Amino acid sequence: MTDTQPVDDGYHPELVEPKWQARWAERHTNEPDLDRAKRPFYNLMMFPYPSAEGLHVGNLFAFTGADVFGRFKRLQGYDVFEPIGFDAFGIHSENFAIKMGIHPGELIPRNIVNFRRQLMRMGGMFDWRHELSTTEPGYYKWTQWLFLQLYQAGKAYKKKAAVNWCPECKTVLANEQVINGECERHPGVQVEQRSLEQWFFRITDYAERLLQNLDDPSKMDWSHSTATAQRNWIGRSDGAEIEFPVEGGEVIRVFTTRPDTIFGATFMVLAPEHPLVDGLTSPGQRAEVEAYRRTVAARDLVSRRVGDKDKTGVATGGYATNPATGKRIPVWIADYVLMEYGTGAIMAVPGHDQRDFEFATRFSLPVVRVLAGDDEDPAAPLTEAVPDTEGMRLVNSGRFDGMPALEGMREVTAWLAESGAGHGVVRYRLYDWCISRQRYWGPPIPIIYCEACGAVPVPEKDLPVVLPALEDFRPDDTGISPLARHKAWYEVPCPACGKPGHRETDVSDTFLDSAWYYLRYTSTEFADRPFDPHRTRTWLPVASYIGGNEHAVLHLLYSRFIAMVLHDLGHVHFEEPFRKFRAHGLIVKDGAKMSKSRGNVVIPDEYINNWGADTFRMYLMFLGPFEEGGDFRDSGIAGPKRFLDKVWNLVDQSSRATAIGGELRVGVVVKWNQTKKRVTEGLEALSYNTAIAALMELVNTLRESNICERRIVRDLVIMLAPFAPHFAEECYERLGGQTSVFEADWPTWDANLILEPELDVVIQINGKTRSKVRVPQGAHEDTVVAAALRDETVQRFISGQEIRKRIYVKDRLLNLVVGA
Ligand SMILES: [Zn+2]
Ligand SMILES: [Zn+2]
């Protein structure tokens, strides 16, 4: 056989892509040695839920961005493990199955086949040996094991709680799933309130740790927006708990973040469900109170929390004593106070709280001002609640008059504590995690109820509790899972005493499946353990996790909580599972949000068939900054294709050139070195669009100078490989490469040949110029921020304050907005 150069007739992705996908599979290119990896790098992306529609362009944008990063790390010499799987349990899958009239046990595997095909087609560096689906008994056995770990550690408990109930879904909804009082899945369907016995996890025990670690760079390097969302969700507030005595010896307990305003508390409001309401209600008010409680009971929690424009409420006819003023103040009930939050009671300070002010105005209750600026008359009537602004002092507050508000908070709390009427406390907005779902398509919660023994955990040897194949899996209106209708499964002897018992019929929340999937990936071949200790120690915590910010507070918070519990129980060596997390941006189509109703959803398959996966990947990554997203326009995709054609021709020329030409011009050498630096830094910072732009500039320089120098073209191909992996493999081979391009070394640059001009950027703190730093021209915002934070003057002005905002004008100015 002669080894002749085939005649080149241009770049044909339809030939190149299947060839390399087949080679990768044959040569196990994407399968790192999980036991002996020297430089393990766990590259994780959020696994999809296998819908019937298949992967949409948003999925592909996210996966490609994560894959580019994994391939870049691989080229830098890491052993990269990039797994993928399917989050296939849950209500989305089940509702769709109901709509189609197909059993989810049949529908889901079908969807997975389609998803797998699409994921292979996009050219991801997936290690398919470790694919998983949360619906496999071999997986959910360990989800149930996880429940038992929490149960035995006292972190799982059952309680009756008011919940949002969708009469269409026939199940409980999380607060986030209720939009303006209606079900997110069923617009027009009013969500009701029900009281159900449910399983909860004590995530609130971990609130402070979940909060503290966010500020610990040795444990977490996360997108600012994601960390902020978690901070707000956990919602720490410092305040005081104060007791207001009522007639008959009882006390109403309230939590307030503003104990300094207690002299302005002129009435109290209780949640209609508050246990003291009955005792407080006077005979004259009883009928009105009862009617109001009935109306409120029919409403959902979310619209109550948001509150109406028109305040509603009813006086109980009872009174409490304000422990600061000693005055009797009336007690009301109103729907805007919730039993689930705080103590279910508030002290109303209408002078300084707008909601209380509106309530007081509506029902003609007294308003007292207790905070005022130096030049204000504390006795003047108010037309609205006075916001607390800097420099205000306490007024109408007895011995505390004239004290600044901040000092007042401390002093009033101390004074109340002396008399036993209150004490300082820290509270969190976070609720315990309700994991019960009264549905079919999920892992059964492994508990058996026995009349003699109560709730008994299913012994570990009996796991998994297999989800039975139910013909009729539809939920009904009882609030009891369809599993209860399956007698053969439901009735079971008690594991403790052997007497007749019955199974828990709730299944667990799909967020429990996804709270630990990253632990399972490295150990999918082990049937006898959820995650292998050696593998876990080698590969975890996850080095890089990329996903959508819509999961900032549920999935990501739950995963952190589960890792902490496992850490405390000695199962894992880390408490933060994701070392680095970056949220990707969103893709819109022609400037508009994509939706089925608009008919503008991009179906990736069509584009990949027409243009090839590599061109599609390049286009997606070139749309805009990865963390911001971009605008998908059909007209834009030809650009990346033309670019790849140009590179193909360069490679062609280079592979034919027999002799190396004369001396390279200095300009070309500088451009070559600058490009290597820019692409490397761009990839590291997920600035994929700038990295691609740098590669395009280099290609233009080479073409203008008529240069196809082998060394340069080879570097170009390697740097393109993360974006266009099949294309780069083919080019690398044509240039004489004997291995996969991913075995090559990432190009390095000569710092002396960068000749990058530097310039001064002005640094402002809160809008005032404080310093300047010298950085390379065109430096990325992160580079400038890092340089600024190294500057001593800047450090002095920031001194422990949080950076709330950063405004960067490229090559000119950086303004850091800081605050306590
Ligand atoms: Zn619904
Ligand atoms: Zn028993």
Image: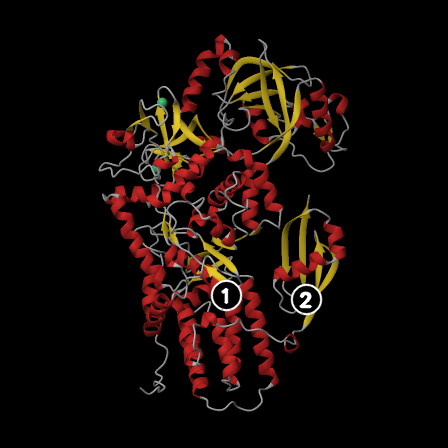
Residue 438 in the image: state x and y as whole percent: 34, 33
Residue 358 vertical position relative to residue 591 in the rendered view, above or below? above
Residue lying at 51% horizontally and 59% vertically, measured from the top left: 40
User: In the image, what residue type sits under mark 1?
Assistant: Phe
Which residue is at the front of the view, 479 or 189? Answer: 479
Which of the numbered marks, if any, corresponds to residue 775?
A: 2
Residue lying at 74% horizontally and 57% vertically, measured from the top left: 769
Q: Which secondary structure lies at badge 2? A: strand
Is residue 374 at least partly visible in the picture?
yes
Between marks 1 and 2, how big is the CA–CA gap? 25 Å
Residue 729 vertical position relative to residue 197 in the rendered view, above or below? below
Q: Quadrant of ligand 2?
A: top left
Residue 157 in the image: state x and y as whole percent: 45, 29
Which residue is at the front of the view, 666 or 361? Answer: 666
Residue 571 vertical position relative to residue 247 in the rendered view, above or below? below
Q: Residues within 10 Å of mark 1 (few under 14, many from 20)?
A: many
Which of the numbered marks, if any, corresponds to residue 72?
A: 1
Which residue is at the front of the view, 449 or 579? Answer: 449
Q: Residues within 10 Å of mark 2 (few under 14, many from 20)?
A: some
Residue 447 in the image: state x and y as whole percent: 37, 30
Q: Ligand 1 near label 2 (Cβ, under 8 Å)?
A: no
User: In the image, what residue type sits under mark 2?
Assistant: Val
